[in-house]
Amino acid sequence: QTATLTISAAKLLELHGAGSTSVDFECKILVGSTPTSVTATQTISIYSPSASIATPAADAFTVLDHVISCTLTGIPAQGISVAWDPYSTTATHFDKNDGTLSGTSQTATLTISA
């Protein structure tokens, strides 16, 4: 017999909003004539990803390179690739760096060459 518990994204958000970063879920049955408890537990970590740019508006000069940093927080693993818009893989004036995961944060940068 397989029992399944489905946890909605809304419930995970509710648990995270209440201050939980991890939750233990226990599956339990009673067996035998003298009931014996048989259990299994799974702990899940709850992440709530967000992104922020420290300076959302800035002046850029055509004779100087400009760097934009975006900090991603609440992520459980290294981001595969950070998307920037507008960005072109064929444009020579864009250089993107996805950054490295540190704890649950990662800072990505986009350099726009003069």
Image (cartoon, rainbow, N blue to C red):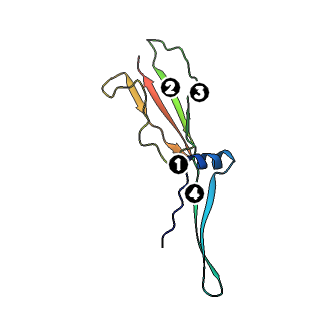
x, y percentage for residue 71?
Answer: 55, 34
What is the secondary structure assignment of the residue under circle 1?
Answer: loop
**Going 58% across and 46% down the picture, which residue do you hit?**
10
- In the displayed structure, 30 sits above or below 33; it is above
Kindly identify which numbered label has been placed on residue 76: 1
- In the displayed structure, 40 sits above or below 65; it is below
- What residue type is disc 2 on? Ile
**Going 47% across and 38% down the picture, which residue do you hit?**
99
* Residue with the mark numbered 3: 54
* Residue with the mark numbered 4: 44
What is the secondary structure assignment of the residue under circle 4?
Answer: strand
The numbered mark, 3 or 2, whose residue comes first in the sequence reads 3
- In the displayed structure, 77 sits above or below 54; it is below
Nearest to viewer (mark 2 / mark 4): 4
Tell me, yes or no, whether the two marked residues, 1 and 3, touch with CB atoms within 8 Å: no
- Where residue 45 sits, quadrant-wise, is bottom right
**Going 59% across and 49% down the picture, which residue do you hit?**
12
Distance between the Cα atoms at labels 1 and 3?
A: 22 Å
Nearest to viewer (mark 1 / mark 4): 4
- What residue type is disc 4 on? Ile
Distance between the Cα atoms at labels 3 and 2?
A: 9 Å
Tell me, yes or no, whether the two marked residues, 1 and 4, touch with CB atoms within 8 Å: no
- What residue type is disc 1 on? Pro
Of 94 and 7, nearer the camera is 7
Q: Quadrant of the C terminus?
A: top left
**Going 55% across and 54% down the picture, which residue do you hit?**
7
What is the secondary structure assignment of the residue under circle 2?
Answer: strand
* Residue with the mark numbered 2: 68
x, y percentage for residue 105?
Answer: 56, 42
